[in-house]
Amino acid sequence: MALAVLMPERTFTYDELDRISQKLPGKWTWPTAAMIWMLDNGLDPELVENFDYEEFALRGGEYLLARYGEEVGRAQIEHSDVEREMKFARHFVEFGRIIQKAPDLSDLVFRIADGAVLIVNINACALNQEPGYSGHFVVICDVEKNSIKIHDPGLPPRPGLIVPVDRFERAWGYPAAADKNLMAIRRKA
């Protein structure tokens, strides 16, 4: 969805997106490989989150457990190729833009007004008011006083989904508010 906005002259198949993100069968997709691809293809991704990519590149799964606790840290380890993600992290730290802080709603509003396409990683279970944890990327379309409009790629896809702010905040800041993240993508100037 984000690439369709930023690169309307191209059409991406799911196979191409899997190659861009270097998706592994049966594993979750981290944003790092896709951000490296974006840097190489005329886009400027900016990452805003408390996650310390340098520390992760050094400590891997140990950092995930220390940073997120047992539930989320263990889920990330079990659903990822941590060693591979550590290599991507080292590369992105060298070339990408990272602001190490927890974003808030004003960060979303500011970047939307600035013309960026926004992607956040949320807990899909919390978004759907279910127990548990499942990391999931959504595109932010608009921020209103009481609701957030998102494009949820699914499954099933839910474009234009309106979510109450409090539910979105719980899903975005999971397991804690300090765990919020934001990827703002623009075309390179």
Image: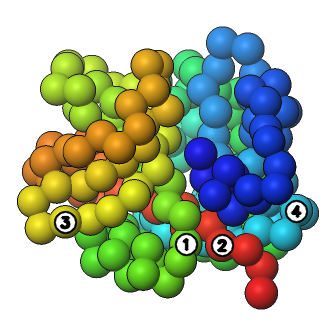
Quadrant housing the C terminus: bottom right
**Do residues under tags 2 and 1 come within 8 Å of each other at their CB atoms?**
yes
Q: In the image, is residue 22 above or below residue 120?
A: above
Q: Which residue is mark 4?
A: 41
Mark 2 secondary-structure assignment: strand
The answer to which quarter of the image holds residue 60 is top right
Q: Which mark is residue 186?
A: 2
Question: Neighbour class for label 2 at 10 Å: few (<14), some, many (≥20)?
Answer: many
Residue 42 image position (x, y, % from top left):
85, 69
Left or right? Give the position of 46 relative to 33: left
Residue under numbered circle 1:
116
Residue located farthest toward the bottom when viewing the structure as drawn? 189
- Calculate the distance from the C-alpha at mark 4 to the C-alpha at mark 1: 16 Å
Label 3 environment density (alpha carbons within 10 Å; few <14, some 14–19, many ≥20)? few
Residue 54 located left or right of residue 169: right
Q: Earlier in the sequence, mark 2 or mark 4?
A: 4
Say which label, 2 or 1, has the lower sequence index: 1
The Cα–Cα distance between marks 3 and 2, rounded to whole angstroms, is: 22 Å
Identify the residue at image location x=41%, y=38%.
159
Quadrant of residue 146 within the rendered picture: bottom left
